[in-house]
Image (cartoon, rainbow, N blue to C red):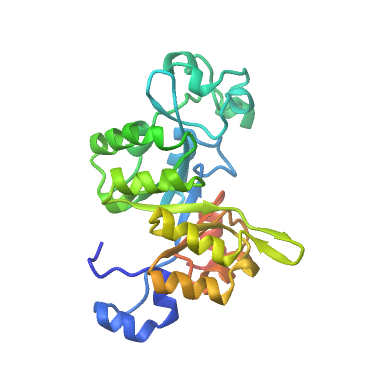
Amino acid sequence: MSACRLPRVLLAASAATLLSACGMEESDPLLFIAHRGASAEAPENTLASFELAWKQGADGVEGDFFLTADGEMVCIHDSTTLRTGGRELVVADSTLAQLRELEYGAWKGPGWAGQPLPTLLEVLRTVPRRGRIYIELKCGAEGLAAVRSAIGRSGLRAWQVVIISFDEQTVLEAKRMLPAHRAYWLTGLKLEDGSWSPSTAEILATLDRCGADGLDAQAKPEAITPELRDGLIQRRLDLAFWTVNDAATAARLGELGAASLTTDRPGALRAELGR
């Protein structure tokens, strides 16, 4: 990654001047990040889903991670195994060995039966040389030591790994413990009594408090006000969106200056956009 790399939202705002300053001819490409892998087709958060995403040409993958009772970071969205594992175990109260007594693919279809629960290190080892991964910490800042250890063992470069979280304290601690890595604050967007929540002011204040490198927002383009875009530009922050599965919304978000779009269908969405 160039030392002169600029957030896509900033490049979109004043392309000619900024690109000239960086010695670049065009802005960074819009990245397609596979949500829990290629989860429209394969069982989410499994090695099969991540491998399929890479085969479909994803620029990166996104996965959800919890810490087990014995200190392993495992890839699963829910705090229990019931939905994808078929039997209920609380992830935080279970060991990796106990969690691996279940399989996590049959719920998606019989052809996927037998998928194990992957560890973070196993997921990191699927990432190709030019790929990247967004690690969503579901367990909070207590998982960051295990994340740091796994990244170190994986051999991935700093630009390939982005930490994302809905919890601002987790983002703040990620920037302290992993300063070389980008960290995004995640937020949903809800229309309440004619106003978006959180508001532009609340979003920018949160980003300032936690020192995030970017905003990873729910894919509601109408909520991205000019004031919010200006605030991100002034702070030189990235703008990312989740979860985007239709081409019209993806195109509109790209026009808003999105750096990346998290999608369940990376191959199909890229094809539909002609990118």
Query: Which residue: 35% across, 36% down?
Result: 144
Q: Residue furthest right?
A: 193
Query: Which residue: 29% across, 54% down?
Result: 159
In this view of the protein, which residue sits in the foreground, 250 or 171?
171
The answer to whether 210 appears left or right of 225 in the picture is left
Residue 79's place in the image compared with 274, above or below, is above
Q: Quadrant of residue 143?
A: top left
In this view of the protein, which residue sits in the foreground, 174 or 2?
174
Q: Position of residue 203 (x, y in %)?
A: 53, 61
Count of numbered badges drawn on the protein: 0
The answer to whether 221 appears left or right of 59 in the picture is right
Query: Which residue: 61% across, 63% down?
Result: 199
Q: Position of residue 247 (x, y in %)?
A: 60, 64
The answer to whether residue 101 is visible is: yes
In this view of the protein, which residue sits in the foreground, 180 or 128?
180
The answer to whether 188 appears left or right of 92 in the picture is right
Q: Position of residue 34 (x, y in %)?
A: 49, 49
The answer to whether residue 57 is visible is: no
The answer to whether 34 appears left or right of 178 in the picture is right
In this view of the protein, which residue sits in the foreground, 126 or 72?
72
Residue 16's place in the image compared with 75, above or below, is below
Q: Position of residue 16 (x, y in %)?
A: 35, 86
Q: Quadrant of residue 148?
A: top left
Residue 22's place in the image compared with 117, above or below, is below
Specify the quadrant that holds the N terminus. bottom left
